[in-house]
Image (cartoon, rainbow, N blue to C red):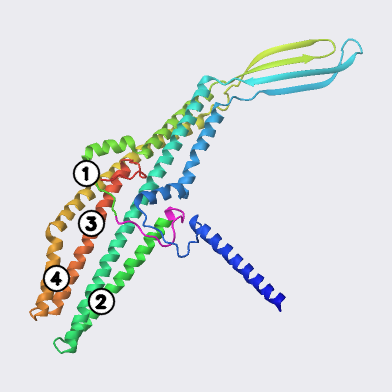
Amino acid sequence: MQSGSRRKEINTSEGKGIGFALAASLSALLLAGGAPALGQTFKPLDLTGFLSLVETHNPELAVARQQRPLADADLLIARSYPNPDIDINVGPWRSRIGGAAGNATGVGITQPIELPSVRAPRIGAAMAGIASADALFDSIRLAIGYQARQAYVDILRRQEDERIGRDNVDLLTQIRDRVLKRVEVGEAPRFELVRAESETLVAENALAAYRLRLDEARATLRRLTANALPPQFELSESLPPVGDAPPLGALQAEVVSAHPTLRGLEAERERARRRLEQERALSAPQPSLRLSDARDPEMRSSTIGLMLSIPLWNKREGQIAQAVAALDLTTAQLEQQRVQLLRELDSAYARLSITRRQIQTFEAGLLRSAEAALQAAEAAYRYGERSFLEVLDAQRTLRAVKVDYNQTRFERIAAWLDIERLRARNPFQVETK
């Protein structure tokens, strides 16, 4: 019996030791940040933190970064020299005079000579390709960065829409409850209760739609970070600042000089021009230096010579025409992109001016007037001076004004972000007021 008791005590102590070890390991994981995602809480994410995640994890940026190594490899290829050709000949030899016989051997080396008129344009085209790759990365980085900024602002807008919808449901619920009491005591017809319930259902459906759009906006943010964000997260309520735009003429000059898409097309035009120079240079005779040594039992001869390729049948007319067409195409694309960017700038500048005036109108008294109208309608309804339909109309007007005001605020931010994108401002550098 004593031995059985001792075995139980030992087993119990071992179980406690294992449990203590597991608890210690779990505590260490929690302290080291290795806790599972389930039930983990995250502090609200601000714009700086979100942009940092996008810059680190976005797959499109990762792909764009690989363009520069390819361009560097093209430059390495362009700077390489052509390899020499060597030929070795061995065969039987027999003298014409006597019956002597033996073997004859010959060795020849041919080294193509690359003219500066061919080599310099090829290297210049490769260097223009590096500039094009850098501009392409800057363009993609600019687009992804401002897409991330717009997505961040959009989710703040959806949060504000959800808050307005929730407040609207609460207000209509209160109105419905008051109407229900008046109907129960016989002070109001049942028709008013039906209207109040239908308005409440409409508001609840709108709130559900707002929440669905909020979930979609969260999914967009997670996609931009390659799902580095958890499924459920919160954002800080701080909106990015909206500055004062310079005059339109100054903005146009800044866009034309700074936008990476135009720089990339200019680099592509330079590369097409260099390729045209190379094709025209290749249409001239290309020299090669040849050294040869021939031996047989009776004699040995060493010669040096110059070989020229004669452009007799192929004068590279097709290659030259193709290079000319490529240069013309790139020039046309550059002008098209310049006009497109200036058109986008005009549109964003006009939207910024319009939304600024609309916000001034809202804040000058339109919001307060709609709220005062609803309060007056509710007070008159309680005293029996107004009908319930007028209360619903005033409430509907206030809701529409709040929704329009919220939409105008975020449209102004969107227009400002478009202007900053066209100015090629660093999207991952957050400025504060």
Q: Earlier in the sequence, mark 3 or mark 2?
A: 2
Q: Is residue 17 left or right of residue 349?
A: right
Choose top left, top right, bottom left or bottom right for residue 359. Answer: bottom left
Pointer 2 residue: 200
- Find residue 39 and report its horizontal and vertical position in percent: 45, 65
Pointer 4 residue: 374
Pointer 3 residue: 408
Magenta residue span: 223-237
Are the residues at dot 3 and dot 2 in contact (C-beta closer than 8 Å)? no
Pointer 1 residue: 244
263 or 45: nearer the eye?
Answer: 45
- Find residue 184 and report its horizontal and vertical position in percent: 19, 89
Within the magenta stretch, is there residue 159? no
Residue 325 seen by the camera: no
Q: What is the quadrant of the N terminus in the image? A: bottom right
Q: Is residue 224 left or right of residue 157?
A: right
- Find residue 237 and report its horizontal and vertical position in percent: 30, 57
Give, as a three-letter code, the residue at label 4: Leu
- Find residue 71 and report its horizontal and vertical position in percent: 50, 35
Mark 4 residue crowding within 10 angstroms, few (<14) / some (14–19) / many (20+): many
Are the residues at dot 2 and dot 1 in contact (C-beta closer than 8 Å)? no
- Residue 356 in the image: above or below residue 117: below
Give, as a three-letter code, the residue at label 2: Thr
- Residue 340 in the image: above or below residue 394: above
Q: Earlier in the sequence, mark 2 or mark 4?
A: 2
Magenta segment, prevailing SS (helix, strand or loop): loop
